[in-house]
Image (cartoon, coloured by chain):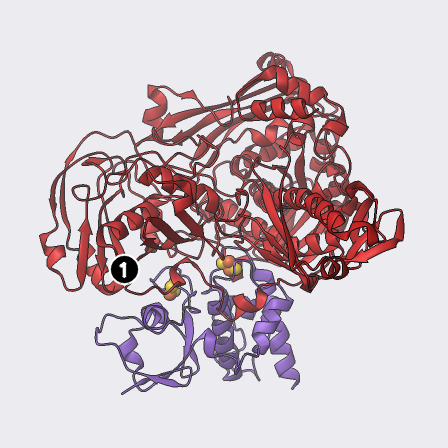
Amino acid sequence: MSNFVENAKQAVQGAAQAAMQKAVELAPDSWIPGGRPDPLIDRKHGLIGAQTSRVDGSLKVRGAAPFAAEFPLEGLLYAAVTFSTIAKGRITTLDTAEAEAAPGVVLVMTHRNAPRMRPMPLFLTSQKAAGGDDLPVMQDDRIHWNGQPVALVLAETQEQADHAASLVRVAYEVEPALLSFAEAKAKGTEPGIFMGPMKLEIGDPEAALAAAPHKVDTVYRTPRHSHNAIELHAATVAWQGDTLRVHDASQAVAHTAWSLAEIFGIDESNVHVTSPFVGGGFGGKSLWHHQVLAAAASKLTGRPVRIVLSREGVYRLVGGRTLTEQRLALGARDDGTLDAIIHTGTVAMTPHNAMPEPFILPTQSAYAARSIKLDVEVVKLDMLANTFMRAPGESVGTFALESAMDELAVELGMDPVELRIRNEPEKDPTSGLPFSSRHIVDAYRMGAERFGWSARSATPGMRREGEWLIGMGVATATYPYHRMPGGAARLTLTRDGRVTVEAAAHEMGMGTATAQSQITAERLGLSLDQVTVHYGDSAMPGMILAGGSQQTASIGAAVIAAQRELVAELLKLAGNDSPLAGLKPDEVGGMNGGLAKLDEPDRFESYVSILTRANSDEVSVVGNAPMPLETQHWSMHSYGAMFCEVRVNAITGEPRVSRFLGSFDCGRIINAKTAASQFRGGIIMGLGLALMEETVFDERSGRIMNPSMAEYHVPVHMDVPEIDVIWTDIADPHTPMGAHGVGEIGITGVGAAVANAVYNATGKRVRDLPITLDKLM
Amino acid sequence: MAITINGSDVEAPGDARVSLLDLVRDRLNLPGTKKGCNQGACGACTVLVDGERVLSCMTLAVQCEGRSVTTIEGLAAGGALHSLQQAFIDHDGFQCGYCTPGQICSAVGMIAEIERGVPSVITADLGGEGLSLSREEIQERMSGNLCRCGAHNGIIDAISEILVREAAE
Ligand code: FES
Ligand code: FES
């Protein structure tokens, strides 16, 4: 079996192939992580699922949680950036004299004096690569996008740096750039690659569509989006001897440390990245040029540097979600069952990144269609590299899929909830794998009941109160369960019976420390205040990316592994004088502040007693999570049924969301309070995607035209109704704690739920996000 | 003339360009006040000047000479939490916590505005007795404080709880 796992490991890393993949699919469950249910699943009345308030709540409400730009260092210099104003070409003149002479200026760094550095290792190209693009970072006179940094100024104060950056004079030789999506498509597309090809065909969907008695065949469009975390991207960096110390705002500390080491040609152990608090990430807080430039400038001056991008700077330097154009065709029989799903289309990316927005992902596992065709094509534009943003793929893919399902329900004269239930698959429709835990129909039934779905009129435009037309819509939410390789955690038990967990993971608002404190306390038989969770430090074990909604499961799996090590150590220490003498690690578990035999809890010794008798101050172990083979053995996802009520003003066209319910099926919920906040937060970002968000890109200049929080609209308090969230709370027997991710699912399905409600209110079908009032007038 | 910040007198900066936000964050090591845009669009930098909420990124430090500034660090005396701070924890009125100091300072200023009878754009009855404490009134008055994590429901719940409690007292 260990050989099996070794081989499977290589298969996951891409070294060996389909044969091994097949072997993992066919292996007995017991060989696979999650093959035996996590014992925590059976603990019903403990800390798991509790409404625990955040352990770091007091720090945050007092403004005492330190963020990246808030580490005071002696002799700190402040940075400001000058950005290119053309999309493509060469710098011909770079006059820095005036900036250099400005008061307080210590350095003006350009491609002429920047240290030699390698490009950023591009995210997904190797295990710890964190870069948003793989372009040279201020190494030559080439311009690749409008907004590329051309100079970095360091000064004694931020005011001096900002002023000096405005004095840098740059002239360019402009070259023709490819900026128009339509023009690029006309020149030809290429297949998108995202962890493998995104092309799939089962049966003959075009023929099935042509023959189907009921069909929908339309194009949906979604624009560019920006993460707009309220914390600006920032880093405070210093070279301490040969070691690069980075206080970052990061959702990938271990990845960032390794990547910076590659860039500067130094050993990974000589880069130390910490990020104890992150003011929102959503996919945007990885490695971009600003951390590299700050580290380079710090190296040149020998002084610590703080870089805080302006809000405009974030738009110029940090990519967002790209635009999509999606064809969604459905062919159905009279009973509503699907003969064909076709989900194809084109997205824009760049020659220097690897992120074709994978909008087909939700369609892979959604419905039991008799034939399926999926295809993502890309065009490459001369723009800032696009990147991951909350539920990449699903957030915009569900807009097309779930809008089309609503259109089909109208065409069939069938209730849209019923249509979805009729197409519920028994196994994954494209991979053929069994589902690990899928109770979406329960979520639909619970949600419909609670929302009062039966009060909806199937005919649009039937409900009006004064000027307001009222409608209801529904859509499916879905996001995969991920657990990436490389999870690890250290458990340290001290003689006072307290435990510390350390893992290179992150807190950006998800409540990581809180949830993991609950889990670890429950697992080891401790109280919440006896557990402390440390994270956000590249020197800690593992590399747990805050992405893919995987942190809870990944840390959870690592702690399971570490607990095994800890128990083995403790049994050794306990020796022959303990009630536990002679027991094997598998026979004991943590309870009541110590270890006990699982089926004979009277055989017990407390942690304090074991360590005291052994005269040991602490026991510290590291556990490595097993390879995530479960995701190749089962089809694993979070699900939700999203119910929305809108009011559309009959005179002005203004759309308002008046009620929203998310009914989720996401395995066991760890913390009812913070999970509800995650769900709501996702839904609210989904309301933004539905109604207002768009990064406006000028196809003539390649410049982003609304690089500010005033002109890029996100939902404000007045836009957000009370959002109801409920969940099935059915544990997945194959995941740590029975949990699925809850961080990204909330944004999925929302665009379609709103669009479908708008149709029900007005009879107008908007297929082009955002749904602004001009489209409804 | 000095600027009083959380009860202590501070000299105004020599560089007139320095905003109140950069004064407290960069020079006084009071980073509880947050920078989210530096252009008056997000509300993360909200502090109280003589009890009124202002955007500290849009306020020059020198404008505050002779005035009294309260930041999140000065809201509660001696380690205790202000009732709003506790209500934010109870209602999970934040996730990442970055917009939170601004939301809380803004709410303190807003409650004082309601007590003074200052109307908002949605206040219907301008001549009426006291202002309604409706959810909509609070939402409208807090809409200058953005939250990207989407903690809006918890924020409004926390503020409502305090308003109702104060009205009862
Ligand atoms: S930082 Fe002042 S309003 Fe955004
Ligand atoms: S809590 Fe993160 S922005 Fe409001």
With A382 as the anchor, is A608 left or right in this view? right
On the image, the x and y values in percent for residue A535 come to: 54, 53
Can residue A128 be seen in this snapshot?
yes
Apparent colour of chain B: purple
Quadrant of the rendering where the N terminus of chain A is positioned: top right
Q: Chain of mark 1?
A: A
Q: Which residue is mark 1?
A: A78
On the image, the x and y values in percent for residue A620 come to: 63, 51
Please name whichever residue, A243 or A324, is drawn nearer the observer in this view of the structure: A243
Number of dots carrying numbers: 1
With A700 as the anchor, is A314 left or right in this view? right
On the image, the x and y values in percent for residue A740 come to: 67, 42
Question: Chain in red?
Answer: A
Please name whichever residue, A99 or A675, is drawn nearer the observer in this view of the structure: A99
With A82 as the anchor, is A2 left or right in this view? right
Queried on whether the Cβ of the residue with tag 1 lies below 8 angstroms from ligand 1, the answer reads no
What residue do we see at 39% from left, 46% from top?
A270
On the image, the x and y values in percent for residue A48 come to: 74, 53
Q: Amino acid at mark 1?
A: Tyr
With B120 as the anchor, is A569 left or right in this view? right
- For label 1, the crowd category at 10 Å Cα-Cα, with few meaning under 14, some 14 to 19 and many 20 or more, is many
Can residue A432 be seen in this snapshot?
no
Q: Quadrant of residue A9?
A: top right
Relative to A690, does residue A525 appear above or below in the rendering? Answer: below
Please name whichever residue, A618 or B4, is drawn nearer the observer in this view of the structure: A618
Relative to A774, does residue B99 appear above or below in the rendering? Answer: below
Secondary structure, mark 1, is strand
Relative to A246, does residue A19 appear above or below in the rendering? Answer: above
Q: Quadrant of residue A615?
A: bottom right
